[in-house]
Image: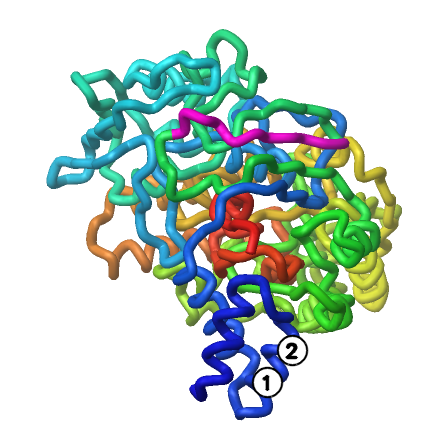
């Protein structure tokens, strides 16, 4: 690298030189855009975080019905707010390793059945109360209670007992599970005073930003918590989150500078948006997937031939091309892809086959009445267009799909997990056990396909306690085949996380776990 480029790199990292101009200089010297962006990211981190300023974020995926109760978190906005204001025992790093947070260390027995989480001292809740192991225990107990209807209930059902042991919380499992620390990173398991037993919606947590404005479906504000324990993150004085469900409006807000970050950039406009001055589009592939879900316990979807007909009637390649514009990959009707270390790439890829679709449709004995598929713009970027493509490809097999467009506000509370056939979105989870335990095992509160299969449950339970990775991979392959061939999920595509960031924001890093740097964009970034 020549001296001029080194100088411009440093200036750009400090926000004193235009990023696009730097990329142009680098390109003229034969440096690819990917390499130049990596250089910028490294230089920004090397320059170190800057404290102060206000960050404004525009997010899709918020509703007027949203609650600050972590157990009830369903949409992207609340997920991001919980990341800004709350903390778990651990997080999962971008490289897939455990990042200790409110637990400062973890120990387990050799059989991975009993785990001890040592709770960090000197941590304060936003109301001034000091964090104790009893708060952690109460949090885990609340999410283990079926009445809480927690999104983490499925992963908590494998716990036999819990207790406080001095400075630690000890968790004993019904069967061994080497992945338990990863499960504790579930964003629902944010630690609350007394576990949220007193008021789960109070929004009192231990994170870097204390919530000062809570206007569901409109706006949230967090102020830097003066007594936050970790001064390496939480650099802004204030973080404002605006709910902007319309994709075009989000992009316009980013271009005008009203906000400095947005989520869910429409892949069809990502390239054009990336050419706008003063900002860039960032994307990373991960475990997120766009789906159409059928309730296996409700007619007509209680007929597996009808479910198979619909799975064969969707053109996956066309959807990846037209809906994702290449920002993603083809799905195979189960929620696992190559981002998971124990993924089985030998499972045959299901493809669009109108003849097979017609065969299974006829075999199902369906009466020919319209099959209603509910969708909304807020289900996932391009969901309405994806439903229209599905309708067209299904028609070629003689399957009558009727598209019902629902309002964005209330979609996740009134349509998802309630209506028998709808568009949906999953961000994925760090490990297969968590994905299956959250959304596919019989006891999971978020089993949104109503896939109740004892054989599948047994396989997941066996895989959880199998410490031999070769045997464990084989078990997960069996589980995947059951979901693929008998389940109620139609998974045509895995999406990249595509977000927009203005050039005056430093510290952005690719994180394949969940959107917006696993929700930590406001926590880890700073003003350039």
* Residue 315 is covered by the magenta coloring: no
410 versus 365 height, above or below: above
Circle 2 residues within 10 Å: few <14, some 14–19, many ≥20:
few
- Point out residue 385 in the picture as x, y percentages from the top left corner: 82, 59
Nearer to the camera, 470 or 242: 242
Secondary structure category for the residue under label 1:
helix
The disc at residue 21 is 2
Using residue 440 as the reference point, say whether residue 266 is left or right of it.
right
Secondary structure category for the residue under label 2:
helix
Say which residue label 1 marks. 25
Q: How is the image coloured?
A: rainbow
Q: Residue at x 84, y 68 (%)?
A: 396
* Span colored in magenta: 218-228
Q: Quadrant of the N terminus?
A: bottom left
Q: Quadrant of the C terminus?
A: bottom right
Outermost residue on the top side: it is: 198
Using residue 37 as the reference point, say whether residue 145 is left or right of it.
left
- Point out residue 313 in the picture as x, y percentages from the top left corner: 73, 63
331 versus 226 height, above or below: below
- Point out residue 522 in the picture as x, y percentages from the top left corner: 55, 44
Q: Residue at x 74, y 60 (%)?
A: 266
Q: Quadrant of residue 130?
A: top left
The disc at residue 488 is none
| Whether residue 10 can be seen here | yes
Q: Quadrant of residue 155?
A: top left
Q: Is there a contact, CB below 8 Å, between mark 2 and mark 1? A: yes
Q: Residue at x 68, y 63 (%)?
A: 279
């Amino acid at each position: 690298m020549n001296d001029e480029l080194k100088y411009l790199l440093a200036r750009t990292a400090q926000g004193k030189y235009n990023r696009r101009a730097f990329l142009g200089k680098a390109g003229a010297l034969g440096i690819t855009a990917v390499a130049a962006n990596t250089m910028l990211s490294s230089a920004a981190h090397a320059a170190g975080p800057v404290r102060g300023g206000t960050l404004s974020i525009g997010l899709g995926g918020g509703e007027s019905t949203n609650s600050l109760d972590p157990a009830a978190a369903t949409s992207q906005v609340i997920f991001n707010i919980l990341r800004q204001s709350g903390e778990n025992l651990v997080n999962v790093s971008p490289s897939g390793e455990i990042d200790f947070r409110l637990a400062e260390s973890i120990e387990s027995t050799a059989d991975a059945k009993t785990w001890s989480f040592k709770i960090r001292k000197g941590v304060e809740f936003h109301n001034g109360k000091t964090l104790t192991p009893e708060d952690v225990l109460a949090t885990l107990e609340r999410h283990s209670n079926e009445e809480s209807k927690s999104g983490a209930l499925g992963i908590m059902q494998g716990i036999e007992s819990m207790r406080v042991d001095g400075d630690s919380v000890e968790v004993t499992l019904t069967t061994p599970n080497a992945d338990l620390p990863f499960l504790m990173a579930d964003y629902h398991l944010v630690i609350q005073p007394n576990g949220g037993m007193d008021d789960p919606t109070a929004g009192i947590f231990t994170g870097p930003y204390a919530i000062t404005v809570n206007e569901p479906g409109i706006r949230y504000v967090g102020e830097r918590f003066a007594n936050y324990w970790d001064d390496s993150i939480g650099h802004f004085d204030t973080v404002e989150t605006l709910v902007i469900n319309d994709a075009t409006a989000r992009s316009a807000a980013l271009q005008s500078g009203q906000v400095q970050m947005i989520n869910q950039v429409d892949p069809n406009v990502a390239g054009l948006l990336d050419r706008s001055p003063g900002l860039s589009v960032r994307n990373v592939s991960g475990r997120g997937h766009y789906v159409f879900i059928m309730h296996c316990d409700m007619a007509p979807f209680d007929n597996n031939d009808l479910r198979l007909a619909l799975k064969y009637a969707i053109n996956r390649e066309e959807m990846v091309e037209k809906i994702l514009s290449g920002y993603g990959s083809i799905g195979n009707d189960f929620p696992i892809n190559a981002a998971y270390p124990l993924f089985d790439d030998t499972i045959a890829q299901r493809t669009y086959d109108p003849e097979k679709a017609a065969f299974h449709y006829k075999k199902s004995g369906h009466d020919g009445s319209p099959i209603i598929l509910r969708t909304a713009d807020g289900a996932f970027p391009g969901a309405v267009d994806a439903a229209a493509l599905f309708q067209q490809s299904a028609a070629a097999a003689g399957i009558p799909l009727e598209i019902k467009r629902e309002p964005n506000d209330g979609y996740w509370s009134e349509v998802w997990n309630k209506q028998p056939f709808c568009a949906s979105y999953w961000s994925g989870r760090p490990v297969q056990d968590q994905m299956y335990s959250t959304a596919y095992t019989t006891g999971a509160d978020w089993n949104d396909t109503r896939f109740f299969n004892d054989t599948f449950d047994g396989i997941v339970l066996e895989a959880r306690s199998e410490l031999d990775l070769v045997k464990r991979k084989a078990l997960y392959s069996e589980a995947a085949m059951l979901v693929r061939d008998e389940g109620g999920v139609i998974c045509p595509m895995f999406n990249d996380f595509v977000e927009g960031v203005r050039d005056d924001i430093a510290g952005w890093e690719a994180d394949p776990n969940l959107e917006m740097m696993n929700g930590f964009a406001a926590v880890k970034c700073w003003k350039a």
